[in-house]
Image (cartoon, helix red, strand yellow):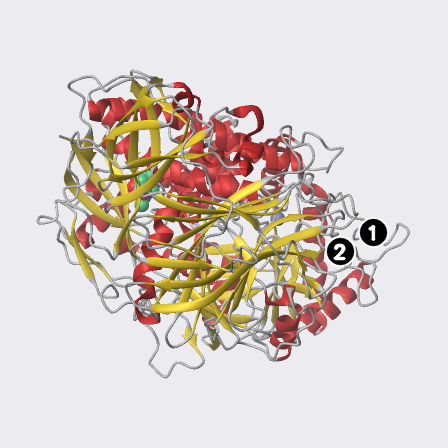
Amino acid sequence: MIRGSFSNMAALSPRLVAAVLCLLTGVLTFPLGPDSERSATCGYESCHATKANMLNVHLVPHTHDDVGWLKTVDQYFYGDRNDIQHAGVQYILDSVVDQLLKNPDRRFIYVETAFFYRWWKQQSSSMQQTVKQLVNEGRLEFVNGGWCMSDEATTHYSAVIDQMTMGLRFLNETFGACGRPRVAWHIDPFGHAREHASMFAQMGYDGLFFGRLDYQDRDRRMRSKEQELLWRASDSLTPPMADLFTGILPNGYNPPTGFCWDQSCDDPPIRDDPDLEDYNVDDVVNRFLVIANSQAMVYKTNHIIMTMGSDFQYENANPWYKNLDKLILYVNAKQASGSRVNVLYSTPSCYLQELHRANLSWALKTDDFFPYADAAHDLWTGYFTSRPALKRYERISNSNLQTCNQLEVLGGPASRKGPFGEGDSQTLKKAMAVAQHHDAVSGTEKQHVANDYARRLAHGWQHCQVVVSNSLAALSGSSAERFYCDNLNISVCPLTESSKKFSVGVYNPLARPVSWSVRLPVNGTAYVISDPKGKPVACEVVPMSRATRGLRRSRGFAVNELVFQVQAPPLGYSTYSVSLLQDGPPPAPTHRRTPTAIQNKFLRVTFDPDTGLLSSLSNLETEQSIKLTQNFYWYNASDGNNAESNQPSGAYIFRPNSSTPFIVSEFAKTETVQTSVVQEVRQWFAPWVSQVVRLYADSRALELEWTVGPLPIDDSLGKEVITRLDTSIKSSEFFYTDSNGREMLQRKKDFRPTWNLKQTEPIAGNYYPINSRAFIKDDVDQLTVVTDRSQGGGSIHNGSLEIMLHRRLLYDDVRGVGEPLNESSRIFPEGLVVRGRLLLSLDRPPAAADTHRPLAQEVVLQPLLTFTHGDPSPNTRLEFSGLQAALPPAVHLLTLTQWDPDTVLLRLEHQFQSQESKVNSQPVTVNLQKLFSTLDVLGVSELNLSANQWRDEMTRLAWTPQTDKKTSPPLKTFRGHSSTWEVTLKPMEIRTFLLRVSVR
Ligand SMILES: *[C@@H]1O[C@H](CO)[C@@H](O)[C@H](O)[C@H]1NC(C)=O
Ligand SMILES: [Zn+2]
């Protein structure tokens, strides 16, 4: 029932709409049980009173429930496989609710909606009423509230926004306003991304708390009382839009030493009957006061927070609450005899409210919290690359999900139920949301759990394929069966391998036309291809490479690849017909000699004829040229037997034994394929490293397709494989990486912007997450590398950029996962082989963003190919665009997804930073009513980034930075926008809309 929320823009102002909505929400969320007379006082109003003249200690009972790690998400939920780890989330929620009801003073926070949702579905309606009551009274409070607590280093912003939206939507729809989290709670992720802070701010959070940061940074912040700060998380968005108050928790997320009263802990309970033995109240109280007073020394206000809980705690909540009740009683009883310490049950938002009331100014931070080290030789920079195959699968699954979402909208209801049966996007949405967890895409889970994440994604994609097929049938008017080839990266596609006549549908999820190179496994040697208008398309048949044959094993049998260029309109598809002309002998043989150069109209690449390696890259349009050598190396992973430290390299930690990597080979054996459509130099370095240097005729980027694995370990050495680009660019120790795929951050060797770094790991300490791109530059040249998944990388030498591609390790790194990162699979029992692509572009620095932003988007949201046998039937619509016109180059259509039967969620994003581009870093306006070709937009209302609040209603606490000379920021972050169909986007802005639509 979205009724009042839709302004028919001319008629209703957003303010009025909001007023109507408020009323309705209020009515809906009043509890119906016997206590329903009591008005809802959740949120800040439900906090316990504190004492102004005392040190107030906020005890926050909580549990940290990983959405998969040592066990799968479902095993954790049920408490299955307790032999691996004793943990059962369903029992935690049962027990906590029970204990909260025993004493209205008690508080609990819950974080991971993936688990809460599972539990909620299984409760009786009377239990659901009880829980609503607890939520309405602020006794049970949701914090963070995303489907999971996402990883920050290896996630892409698009998937993070989606998973937050999903969790927060469930909370809003189930609990209304009282279910809306005020605080972001990222207590466990291994380092913190600036883009995450920016997103949290735009989602309306008042503050963020976390537990992990570099130990040197923490020491300094403790000394200077800067453990609480204001994070200005965007260079482009106008403050305070991306400002986020950020608090560092005192003890990770654990209770203080000696005060863990979970059934899994061994600390002494409070023994308070003087008639019994071992009365210990005085001892407990004294120990507590010592800890509280020393903690107060390193924070600014007379309020401190203590996290009373940890991983999967509160399965039996009774011991925790029984002892906390007593702790509060006895510590506060001391006030009568002059103690100045006041203890209370609290939540992160109640604590945050007190910090806000203190009305101080806070240190301002503008960089991020990467990399994270918890000791001198313990850099958590390995997981930036760990499980590279899962990382790629997660990224391509996001692309497939966005396509599925779009087609579900564009095809109308027939997409969900049509000629190919019933499909849904929900299954893949949930699988993607789970995959964002900080032990999922991060690669820090056990092998069987990694398999479970991948299986969920595959299962979700099955459901989405039905949606895609139904939608394309509706849009094209043809119900011919569509086939999907998910293994095209290793040239496997049964249909194209055997068919003499087939058509290829290319769906483009971007809001501008794209041109893309297609490679299909085939067995013929000559084909004719026609585009949707019947015009012939240039194509070439090239022999399948040895590396690809080795990789696909028995999964395919094609001997050749058919290569051609396709175009697809914005949010639309094009259909290409392919017919076999000739079976005959194999195509033009490959040449054994390395050519001196390959080139197209944009780029020229030269090779060293002696080594077979790249030697230079030139941009022919801008007439610039750099020296460029590229090769593969491996670091020998530390096994821990080392004088400085016994820390081995593992799933989390990167610790090379030596700063000098071994070279895989000085030379590459090469083969060359030169055709009018594509030119390739195939390089072979070792049985486990090969690469194709590829230049398509129409591409502004050079493709490096690497194939690495199985990494040999018969020498008992763990290996971490990198590729390194050594150039003539004078990068002066700087390089640049993206934050979650969005804004770029400057990195400097052996340097952190906010403290004096003592560098203890010259390689691992210079590694940063690369989500979608990195670059090095000087005044005239910028070399950008676009990646196809998250990877770790660094610039150790001037002019050099290295990217870690694959890791295979023999020891566990003692951070809990308890397994060495040593991946194999059924098809690769001898060790996993991974293939991926890097796209290189060379530009003049001021214009480089104009190239790498669209390039990166094309990799993140890549066209989806579908295949049908034979010729399309006569009345088939061969080309379609869901948009009336392409969006301007600066605008990215981030989200288009069905929300309710009559509404769709739309996110438009300005994809350039301010000042980044002369042409594109300008505000740009889009008309929402004239957007779609198949949908009439009847109404629109704007939401916050996570779509759980009307934008006009969103208010946030205002915080004053120490260094800001300006007067205090306005109370509201967002103002209502003028009521019009025209929306303007400023650099890096994302705007979220709910559209009421009808299918034309
Ligand atoms: C929140 O949920 C309520 C129902 O509980 C719904 O009426 C309202 O529209 C939702 N708010 C938003 C912003 O979606
Ligand atoms: Zn965790």
Q: Is residue 574 above or below residue 973?
A: above
- The outermost residue toward the bottom is 965
Label 2 secondary element: loop
Tell me which amino acid carries mark 2. Pro
Instruction: Kindly identify which residue carries mark 1.
Output: 273
Q: Where residue 993 sits in the image (x, y, percent)?
A: 25, 47
Is residue 772 rendered to the left or right of residue 296? Answer: left
Q: Residue at x 51, y 49 (%)?
A: 150
- Mark 1 to mark 2: distance in Å? 49 Å
Where does residue 260 sit, x and y in percent of width and height? 74, 52
Dot 1 or dot 2, earlier in sequence: 1
The quadrant holding residue 644 is bottom right
Q: Which mark is residue 648?
A: 2
Q: Quadrant of the C terminus?
A: top left
Q: Is residue 473 left or right of residue 775?
A: left
Q: Nearer the viewer, mark 1 or mark 2?
A: 2
Q: Is residue 153 above or below residue 999?
A: below
Q: Is residue 186 visible?
A: yes
> With 170 as the anchor, is 186 left or right in this view?
right
> Residue sitting at 52 percent across and 57 percent down?
609
Disc 1 marks a residue whose amino acid type is: Asp
Task: Determine the residue positioned at 59% across, 43% down.
Answer: 100
Q: Residue at x 60, y 33 (%)?
A: 451
Q: Quadrant of residue 863?
A: top left
Q: Taking 230 as reference, is 23 left or right?
A: left
- Under tag 1, what secondary structure? loop
Q: Position of residue 940 (x, y in %)?
A: 19, 45
Please state, as top left, top right, bottom left or bottom right, where the N terminus lies in the image: top left
Circles 1, 2 touching at the beta carbon (< 8 Å): no
